[in-house]
Image: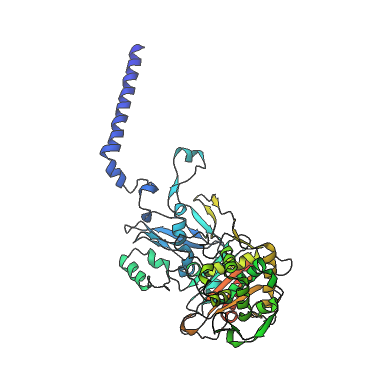
Amino acid sequence: MDRRIKLLAAVLVACFGLLFLQLNNLQVRQASALRSSPYAPREPGNSDPFTQPRGDILSADGVVLAYSTPTKDGYGELRRYPEGPLFADITGRYDVVDSAATGLEAYYDRYLRPHPSPSGSLSQLLTEHVGTDSIILTVSSTLQHVAEQALAPYPQGAVVAIDPRTGAILALYGKPTYDPNRFASHDPKAVHRYYESLNPTSGTSPLIDFPVAQTIAPGSTFKVVTTSALFDHARRYLTQVFPQQSALSLPETNLQLHNYAGEVCGGDLAEVLAVSCDTAYARLGLEIGAENLAREAQAFGFNQVPPIDLPAGEVAPSYFPPASSFAQNLPGVAYSAIGQENVRETALEDALVVAAIGDGGVIMAPHLLSKVIDDQGHVVASYHPHPWRRATSAATADAVRRLMLGVTAPGGTAAGVFPPGLAVAAKTGTAETGSYGCSSTWLVATAPAGAGETPRVAVAAVVPSTAGIGCSETGAQVAGPIVAKVLTAALALP
């Protein structure tokens, strides 16, 4: 018996000795060869992510917007964007040649790149599973195509549609745009040629995310904020009746502020908002005062970057001048109250303004993500809607919404823009500060907005002044049809 025990002990010692030698062989002598083996599993944190597979990006209605396919050219994976430029403002680009990413490709990179997945079974507890997740968006491919077609006649412009109840972005499209497939190419010279062709240092490059980063004078759509400021800070002026006039003499100058096209307008608040009377609103701005206007603009999100899930630096804040800047410039207060002077706004911010009116004064945080699913089809994360800020009281939002219904009623500046029978609260804008001596045209709207109805969609569209476009068009004529098409299509979504 003792001899057998000694023999067994010798065998075990020999086995441990062989195991020790093999561990040293693998960890020391063959380590370099094993690390470089194509069959070796890659640790995501220790490998080049631009040679690794990535998860898909899908629209709310299941259309694949980005995916990866293996290659044998040394780059490992080729990123593809089946919808081309249509979603470039959202997906961004994944540039393997220059190791750069933008848009959702950058913001949600931690999900899209290979990473250890949570264990969902006993076998996964014993062997670490490395995989990629896919992200599902709130944006509808169907609605995005409607936005693209609505903007087709114009070389520049942007449209944003939001669910005011949740902040979910339903459509976000801008022009000019670019093809992210051209950046995903593995041909360095072709990638660099394409990059230079987009005039990357110009202020109008397609690489600028127009809907969220291009700021333009909002014109009379800013009267939504001015009207809210009247209710919130200067209620004593609510019942005044404005004189019928075509021009307003500006304080401290011998200059006059004229109505659009020299029209004569006046009346009570409902009348002057419906026809977008500049002289009345310039007077209101002076009565409300620079401090209160600036405070209201701040409450609606001006001078802050909206918390949309896109990388820092790709989203611009809208701008309203500080109250101190008007100390020696009362005419500037009058012009700022009608969205001109130095006021600048993105299409996203204007959509958030009208969304606040549609949602009882609350601006929900805008977001593009719906949920994240792993490569086994399990939901690993979901977006939870939450407020960004309270822009105004529910009472003010309700009052302003009722006034905005007059804009789409007979006699209003947006009369006939929307389908009959649909109650739409809207505001037109024609900012006469654009280039080429023309105007930038805007329209914002939320619907359904009748008594007892809960708005489900808020839309903003802008077409900036551009060479080759006529100078006599208004917000209702240019931006109106864009908003009408997107809004009605959004309301028809399942």
Q: Is residue 55 left or right of residue 485?
A: left
Whether residue 322 is visible here, answered yes or no, is no
Please provide percent x and percent y for residue 86. Answer: 49, 69
Q: Quick one: which residue is furthest to the left in this view?
A: 29
Q: Nearer the viewer, residue 138 or 463?
A: 463
Query: What's the colour scheme?
Result: rainbow
| Residue 87 vertical placement versus 265 (above, below) | above
Q: Nearer the viewer, residue 419 or 373?
A: 419
Quarter of image, res 296: bottom right
| Residue 411 vertical placement versus 210 (above, below) | below
Whether residue 352 is visible here, answered yes or no, is yes
Q: Is residue 224 left or right of residue 69?
A: right
Q: Nearer the viewer, residue 29 or 394?
A: 394
**Residue depicted at 39% across the width and 48% down the height:** 44
**Residue depicted at 61% across the width and 81% down the height:** 279
Please provide percent x and percent y for residue 80. Answer: 43, 63
Q: Is residue 461 left or right of residue 8?
A: right
Q: Is residue 408 left or right of residue 381?
A: right
Q: Nearer the viewer, residue 15 or 260?
A: 260
How many circles with numbers are drawn on the protein? 0
Please provide percent x and percent y for residue 68. Answer: 42, 58
Q: Quadrant of the N terminus?
A: top left
**Residue depicted at 39% across the width and 68% down the height:** 182
Please provide percent x and percent y for residue 392. Answer: 64, 63
Q: Quadrant of the C terminus?
A: bottom right
Q: Quick one: which residue is furthest to the top in this view?
A: 2
